[in-house]
Image (cartoon, rainbow, N blue to C red):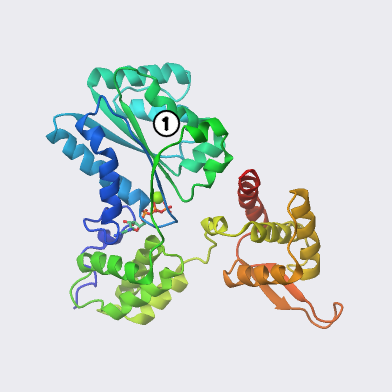
Amino acid sequence: MRGGVFRDETILYPEYIPKETPHRDKHLKLLELYFQDVLENPLKVSQNVMLYGPVGSGKTMLARKLGDMMEKKAMLYGCFVKFLHVNCRIDRTLHSVLVRALNYLGQNYPSRGYGFEELLHVLVSELALKKIHMVVVFDEVDSLVYSEPSSLYTITRMREVTRNYQVFSSLLISKTLDYIRTLDLSTISSLQWNTVYLEPYSSEQLFDILLSRSTEAFNEGCIDEECIRLVADMASVYGDARYAIDILYRAGKLAEASGSGRVFPEHVRQARASLPPQLRKEELNYLTKHQKFLLMAISNLLKNNSSPYVTIGEVEKTYSALCESFGVTPNHHTQVWNDVTELSRKGIIETQLSGKGIRGRTTLIGLSIVPAKELIEELERGIVADARG
Ligand SMILES: Nc1ncnc2c1ncn2[C@@H]1O[C@H](COP(=O)(O)OP(=O)(O)OP(=O)(O)O)[C@@H](O)[C@H]1O
Ligand SMILES: [Mg+2]
């Protein structure tokens, strides 16, 4: 019997930290450079960096690599630097981040019962006592900022808590910098931070990433470059390495399940089809202001509608009213039509021609995948951020 196609499938697990990171070496170098002073002088210097880029562009991975590397190097320098990775979708308040930081240091504080100031004081004294400089990675930081708008201001001011020594740095991770637009000016002005941007991966770049991961993951001769290129092309629409690796992994699983000793293009196509069609909410961030208004109008009309479709005429009316309520001049019909086409091309809405019944023929618009209610919630944030910006 032939062996499976995988040499080690864990290499394709989402949490695996790869040794090689094609097309991200220069970004990692830049991050290292920004934190170099902290390494050399951990009790004197503090650093704040923002790392941002679209879904699956390698942000969490880079933060983890940076953390491993810095903690190791710090030992060589004879000092302690500790990285704490916090996911702000889970820890949505600075208070709970502090509790996590204290737990990390072996101080077991319950999540309730202590005030913020008190916890901050304990944390800072604990770090100073142990001569530890803590770098907190606030992953998905926008969740924290939305639920606690003053948090970012507090983070930027942490270095002022202690005068003669520094024990705290931060790395903020997000998909866009939109959350900054929701802040007040005094926070923005204190945000003279270093930023590192990760652009979405091109098909060629995804190919290199997949190739490097698959050399370790698959047995020799079990997958050829053509298949890898096909996966890269499929995922390049999003520039998302996670999606690409997921397709590759599933294709390998399907090949094994079918008893084939190799991955064929058909496995790749099946793998993609097996992934649930879903709108990547992040995509909404990349829509123009008018596209957001338009989608909001469509969602509002469809939310309680008995029919799954609305006519383009109704959409235009609601869209214009919505624009005006935000003090924005609505676009003309041709531009609205272009935006409808664009939303449909992105797979967010569906369009079709009505039967002859309704005042001749007209275009009907429906939502492809996401329920109207979800879209409305997601869009509200974006529109409010745009309006303030
Ligand atoms: N250059 C690369 N080389 C190898 N693997 C990569 C590379 N970039 C990303 N990956 C892999 O792609 C997957 C997604 O990366 P990661 O989780 O860092 O994305 P992210 O930018 O944090 O996305 P999200 O915004 O959705 O959290 C991970 O499995 C990661 O190891
Ligand atoms: Mg991430």
Residue 196 in the image, given as x and y percentages of width and height: 37, 48
Residue lying farthest to the bottom in this orientation: 356
Quarter of the picture containing the C terminus is top right
Counting from the top left corner in percent of width and height, residue 152 is at 48, 33
From the viewer's perspective, is 11 left or right of 198?
Answer: left
Picture quarter with the N terminus = bottom left
Of the four image quadrants, the one with ligand 1 is bottom left
In the image, taking residue 21 as reference, residue 97 lies left or right, namely right
Q: Nearer the viewer, residue 367 or 13?
A: 367
Residue at position x 80%, y 55% in the image:
321
What residue is at 14 percent from the left and 33 percent from the top? 77
Instruction: Tell whether 306 sits left or right of 7.
Output: right
For residue 248, what is the image quadrant?
bottom left
Residue at 22 percent of width and 63 percent of height: 8
Q: Which amino acid does label 1 sit on?
A: Val
Q: Horizontal and vertical percent for residue 330? A: 75, 59
Residue on which the image places disc 1:
97
Res 114 visible: no
Q: How crowded is mark 1: few (under 14 residues within 10 Å), some or many (20 or more)?
A: many
